[in-house]
Image (cartoon, rainbow, N blue to C red):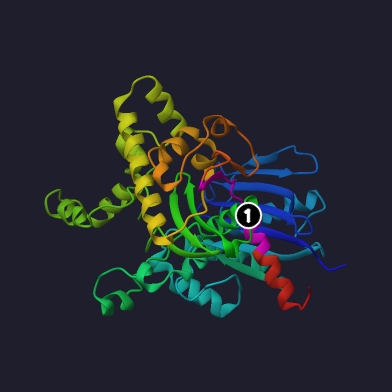
């Protein structure tokens, strides 16, 4: 029998998240995380789904090579090792693929060189992604390694949406354009929303709101992204946990000239000290809602700014799409914060958007509608599954390359 397992690796600067899936049914065989790589107190947490019991250790893990070898050892204890003949491929999350990578891609030296060439536009993410790929290739050089790019889903945006209104020659020379991120999530959720409506993705127009600590919106027409809120980097767009989102670019010049701040200081301010945490000192929506219930004015203002930006993007993408069949909320805040969902569509009844209070209050892990049965536009909560999306794309590519149905 042909191998059907895919190992999904998400290599960060100091962590490796992983899941092993069986693509016959998309079930998970094991999940885990290695964090604080490079420190004396590194941690590995590993959960085989057959038992559901988490095990691991706290000890020094000096680098990603050691981390992946530790992961391989834990998987081997469950009979799921990297040397298993049932392993079909390893799928890697790669944050930035630029304009070049529009689909999942089998990694070779040329692909690695192009990912490396994109480091200047993704300095925090692509180096770590590269390290994970190189280490996995060294451990299993015979196995297909597939890169799945966060930006790929957004490469269908028209130039009118992707280009910034700056000098064209300068933009092209420095690869400045809107790339978008969270693409695997937007792809999965837009398709799952169509399925929830009982329609083909090609028939459905969806606004996807991926609301986590990082947050982004997308306008998806017939299964293809036509606009998204993040840009050259994940800083543009919605108010996020620690990122500012949209802002007058002249603020940067003002802070340099008047505030005496360096480029690095401003980068830190906008990416790590802004958004919700900059507005009220918290980036956890649960804590913000608790503070609001206690009458905290700073928390209330942060929430109002967050929702105001959401409404603007819903309205803008409604105009871009012309017809909207559904608005889908996903990721940590989108899936769990009923007050955010209610506030985001409040006052948009003229656009056919409304939520049912009782349905909105229900918690669950399955995709569900929270709009009234007679609503003109469906409002949905669709839990995202980026690992399954990466595994699905990886497995489909490997099967196609091997000529298997």
Q: Front-most of 300 and 279?
A: 300
Is 150 placed left or right of 23 in the picture?
A: left
Q: Quadrant of the N terminus?
A: bottom right
Q: Residue at point 30% right, 68% down?
A: 164
Q: Is residue 8 left or right of 81 when viewed as pictured?
A: left
Which residue is farthest front? 374
Q: Residues within 10 Å of mark 1 (few under 14, many from 20)?
A: many
- Residue drawn at (58%, 63%), measured in percent from left and top? 203
Residue 364, above or below 270? above
Could you tell me which secondary element the residue under label 1 belongs to? helix
Magenta residues?
A: 376-392
Q: Answer above or below: position of 104 versus 253.
A: below
Classify 251 as above or below 41.
below
Residue 276 % position (x, y): 36, 39
Farthest residue to the left: give it: 258
Closer to us: 331 or 222:
222
């Amino acid at each position: 029998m042909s191998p059907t397992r895919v190992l999904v690796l998400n290599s960060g600067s100091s962590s490796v998240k992983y899941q092993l899936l069986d693509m016959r049914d998309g079930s998970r065989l094991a999940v885990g995380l290695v964090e604080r790589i490079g420190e004396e107190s590194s941690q590995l947490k590993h959960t085989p789904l057959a038992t559901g019991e988490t095990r691991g250790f706290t000890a020094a893990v000096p680098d990603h090579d050691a981390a992946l070898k530790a992961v391989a050892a834990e998987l081997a204890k469950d009979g799921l090792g990297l040397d298993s003949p049932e392993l079909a491929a390893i799928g890697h999350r790669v944050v930035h693929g630029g304009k070049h990578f529009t689909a999942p891609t089998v990694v070779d030296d040329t692909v690695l060189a192009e990912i490396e060439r994109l480091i200047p536009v993704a300095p925090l993410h692509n180096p770590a992604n590269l390290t994970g790929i190189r280490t996995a290739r060294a451990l299993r050089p015979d196995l297909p390694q597939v890169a799945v790019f966060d930006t790929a889903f957004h490469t269908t945006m028209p130039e009118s949406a992707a280009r910034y209104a700056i000098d064209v020659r300068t933009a092209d020379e420095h690869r400045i354009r809107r790339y978008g991120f969270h693409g695997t999530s937007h792809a999965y959720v837009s398709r799952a929303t169509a399925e929830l409506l009982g329609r083909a993705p090609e028939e459905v127009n969806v606004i996807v709101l991926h609301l986590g600590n990082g947050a982004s919106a997308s306008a998806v027409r017939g299964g293809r992204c036509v606009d998204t809120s993040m840009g050259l980097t994940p800083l543009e767009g919605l108010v996020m946990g620690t990122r500012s989102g949209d802002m007058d670019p002249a603020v940067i010049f003002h802070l340099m000239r008047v505030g005496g701040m360096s480029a690095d200081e401003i980068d830190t301010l906008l990416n790590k000290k802004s958004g919700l945490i900059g507005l009220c000192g918290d980036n956890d929506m649960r804590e913000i809602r608790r503070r609001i219930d206690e009458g905290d004015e700073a928390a209330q203002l942060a929430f109002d700014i967050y929702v105001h930006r959401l409404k603007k993007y819903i309205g803008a993408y409604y105009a871009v799409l012309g017809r909207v069949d559904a608005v889908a909320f996903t990721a940590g805040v989108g899936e769990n914060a009923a007050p955010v969902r209610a506030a985001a569509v409040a006052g948009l009844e003229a656009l056919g958007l409304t939520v049912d209070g009782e349905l909105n209050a229900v918690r669950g892990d399955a995709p569900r509608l929270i709009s009234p049965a007679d609503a003109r536009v469906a409002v949905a909560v669709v839990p995202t599954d980026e690992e399954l999306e990466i595994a699905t794309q990886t497995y489909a590519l490997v099967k196609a390359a091997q000529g298997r149905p």
